[in-house]
Image: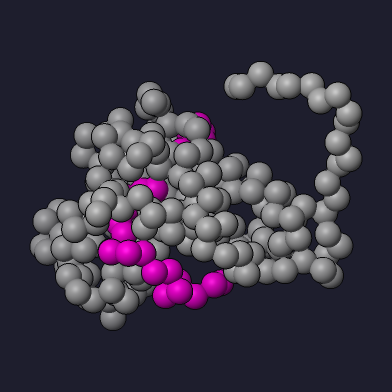
């Protein structure tokens, strides 16, 4: 699993992230361009042989931000953009964090200037969703020193699925296929960390200045 400390959001990035609902998700409301026929059919793009594939971590910053935006904008209810808004604010859920203002996020309130711990907590939240964070984060990361009192809350919204949400996972699968054609490898076991890292990089790029 790629080291999460490599994630460097420009500010502490908290998603109360972070979906069309799967059968196991609560139902809630959500918030094509014509295809132009080419005169000459383009040759199909062939995926590079498995042995020639580069790891997805070799993608440059701009590419990771691009893919993070695609993950963030996955269509469906309880996706990142459904709850938080397409621009990171004013989404369907009034209580959802404004992702353009990291100073207001609970994780930032808890860890203040400790970026390493903030990044650990943020990555856990985005990777696992609010329900698992509420029940497992303190036990899984006892050295993190999480304090709900400082967070000014008792739990994250359990409708915050992060990159585990079904539509978000479907978007990552499409990106995985596209990466293979471009010569990059993204293993199934890496899909969650890929989604987490790229979304965080995207959020850093839309942070209000």
Q: Quadrant of residue 10?
A: bottom left
Rendered location of residue 207, percent (x, y): 30, 53
Query: Is residue 204 toward the left or the right of residue 105 in the image?
Result: right
Quarter residue 50 falls in: bottom right
Tell me how many marks there are. Answer: 0
Q: Residue at x 36, y 70 (%)?
A: 120
Q: Is residue 58 above or below residue 165?
A: below
Residue visible at 48% across and 62% down? 197
In reply to whether residue 97 is colored magenta, the answer given is: no
- Predominant SS of the magenta segment: loop
Q: State which quarter of the image contains the N terminus.
A: bottom right
| Residue at the spot 29% in from the left edge and 69% down from the top edge | 118
In front: 140, or 197? 197
The picture places residue 71, in percent across and down from the top left corner, at 51, 46
Q: Position of residue 95 (x, y in %)?
A: 21, 39
Residue nearest the viewer, comparing 38 with 189: 38
Q: Was residue 14 drawn as part of the magenta stretch in this picture?
A: yes
According to the image, what is the colour scheme of the structure?
A: one colour
Instruction: Report the residue that reaches farthest toward the front.
Output: 39
Compared across the picture, whether 196 is left or right of 124 comes to right
Q: Residue furthest bottom?
A: 143
Residue 24: in sight, yes or no? no
| Percent x, y of residue 205 | 39, 55
Span colored in magenta = 1-24
Q: Residue at x 16, y 63 (%)?
A: 109
**Is 17 situated above or below 81?**
below
Q: Nearer the viewer, residue 60 or 120?
A: 60
Question: Is residue 147 something one can see in this rendering?
Answer: yes
**Relative horizontal placement of residue 50, taking residue 160 as reference (left or right):** right
Which of the image's four quarters has the C terminus? bottom left
């Amino acid at each position: 699993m790629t080291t999460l400390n490599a994630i460097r959001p420009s500010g502490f990035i908290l998603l109360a992230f972070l979906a069309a609902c799967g059968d196991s998700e609560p139902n809630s409301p959500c918030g094509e361009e014509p295809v132009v026929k080419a005169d000459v059919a383009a040759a199909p793009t062939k995926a590079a042989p498995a042995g020639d594939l580069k790891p997805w971590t070799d993608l440059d910053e701009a590419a990771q931000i691009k893919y993070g935006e695609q993950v963030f904008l996955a269509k469906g209810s309880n996706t990142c953009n459904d709850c938080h808004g397409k621009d990171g604010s004013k989404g369907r859920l009034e209580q959802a964090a404004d992702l353009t203002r990291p100073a207001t996020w609970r994780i930032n309130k808890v860890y203040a200037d400790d970026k390493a711990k903030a990044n650990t907590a943020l990555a856990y939240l985005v990777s696992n969703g609010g329900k698992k964070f509420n029940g497992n984060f303190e036990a899984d990361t006892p050295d993190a020193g999480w304090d709900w009192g400082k967070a000014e809350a008792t739990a994250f919204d359990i409708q915050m699925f992060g990159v585990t949400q079904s539509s978000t996972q479907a978007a990552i699968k499409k990106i995985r296929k596209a990466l293979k054609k471009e010569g990059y490898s993204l293993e199934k076991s890496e899909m969650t960390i890929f989604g987490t890292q790229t979304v965080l990089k995207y959020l850093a790029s839309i942070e209000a200045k």
